[in-house]
Amino acid sequence: MPKVVVPEEKRRRRRPTRSGKVLSEQMIVDTALRLLREHGAAGLTARRLGLALDCDPSTLYRYFRGMDELTLAIGDTLIGQALQGWGPTGSWRDDLRTLGLRIHAAYVAHPQAAVLTTSRVTGRANELAADEAVLTVLSASGLPVRQAVAVYHAFIDQTLAFASLDAASLALPNAALLAEEEVWRSTYSRLPSATHPHIAEAAPLLATQMVSSAFPAALELLLDGVAARMHPRPS
Amino acid sequence: MPKVVVPEEKRRRRRPTRSGKVLSEQMIVDTALRLLREHGAAGLTARRLGLALDCDPSTLYRYFRGMDELTLAIGDTLIGQALQGWGPTGSWRDDLRTLGLRIHAAYVAHPQAAVLTTSRVTGRANELAADEAVLTVLSASGLPVRQAVAVYHAFIDQTLAFASLDAASLALPNAALLAEEEVWRSTYSRLPSATHPHIAEAAPLLATQMVSSAFPAALELLLDGVAARMHPRPS
DNA sequence: GTTCTTATGCCAACACAGTTGACCTTACGC
DNA sequence: GCGTAAGGTCAACTGTGTTGGCATAAGAAC
């Protein structure tokens, strides 16, 4: 049993697995992402991951201290994907909007992975880069540090919170998903108007509305608020 | 094996368990909440629940189709607690604010339970009551149905999203929590300003800011937006 | 009160999970 | 080339949700 996990950049020996493949942290994370997409959030298991990589499950413990540390690495990869190719434009508002939408999109693109990682602080490279980017944009806009931190907090939390919520409903195992649709169809849209008049009235609208994300609208509201702080109008 | 679960209100026979206790859906949910609080989100298992109730784990399947259905019942109980004693005041803005804060608070008060349920649609009694309440408030304010549904969507999703995020960080197992604090202390506050100048500058503020919730501020922003739609100022 | 039925609790077993310690083999530093 | 130890493998441990079969006592019927 590995008491210490050799960090990726320190790895010297690369012994191939029984089947000839040579493992790497990146390859494991990528395979994990594939498993998550294919088998759902509960489908990522050490055993299945070993099967997919054609290695023994215990081999994974040479790369990660446990399944939890693996999920942190997965999360950091997602943030990395969100930031790939991004650069500041000079407009703080455009930059924040783009960053928010990109992060949200990256998570929602891998819902099963997002569920596991949205609420975790990893301290890994890509997460740090993202935080630095947001603070840089806010700082360049002229906002004093104190306010910049407050805005950063609201911005990043709202983005992650919606990413988490939206991902969660996309990531439900098929059975639960069907059950949930069934609830909307059989329960909500057939409530007697005697007991729940407003739900009954709004039922058709609800069915169509609730499938899309409220994040873009909420993000725009937040940006409005920030703008108001920057250029307070005389009241 | 119970192919069909007898719904609580149809239950006639109440056979006491080996230890003399007479079970009920409510008692099971309450015990589950206690276990969640005491042993964390991963500490709620059928076996442990059976141990706490002094009954066989399989007995639980007479009350719930599986652990998943139990978590839905737990979630509905939380919503019920949020609504207990609440009544509309006539001011839509106060009512929405109170509802949002109450729901958020109810979830955050049981973080480990919230993590399991925030993103689920249960269709159970208390959830329906909450939705009807929000729609009633909005409708009474004079908002047309279409807009009321849009606002309802943003409102409920934002509330649940923040509840989920805030709960998640409170619900982390002790080991992960310590690891996370360690990340803030050792990684974030010791980043060289050469590579991450803005994080380095904001580090002390970050450490104090990030522990509190951004929800109240975000909620107020949303209410501002709704108010603007109701009384659009000439542009 | 007695009898009958069946709801409901209990038991034993299943497949699967994460994790660990001991072992073996082979790639690399010297 | 050789010796070392990194890293892959094997087998086993505990704990999980879930299920089918069985026993028993609660409540209905008379």
Image (cartoon, coloured by chain):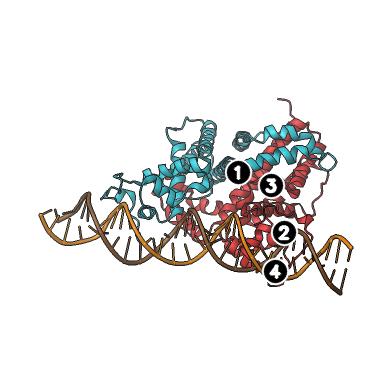
Chain colours: A cyan, B red, C brown, D orange
Q: For the residue labelled by badge 3, is the local secondary structure a helix, a strand or a loop?
A: loop
Residue at 75% x, 45% y is: B128
Kindly indicate whether the residues beneath marks 3 and 2 are on one polypeptide chain.
Answer: yes
Decide which of tag 2 and tag 4 comes sooner along the chain: 4
Q: Distance from label 1 to label 3 (Cα)?
A: 14 Å
Q: Amino acid at mark 4?
A: Thr
In the picture, the disc for residue A175 is 1
Q: Amino acid at mark 2?
A: Glu
Decide which of tag 3 and tag 2 comes sooner along the chain: 2
**Disc 4 marks which residue?**
B17
In the picture, the disc for residue B122 is 3
Chain identity of mark 2: B
**Disc 2 marks which residue?**
B25
Spot occupied by residue A29 in the image (x, y as percentages of width and height)? 41, 45
Q: Distance from label 3 to label 2 (Cα)?
A: 16 Å
Q: Tally the numbered discs.
A: 4
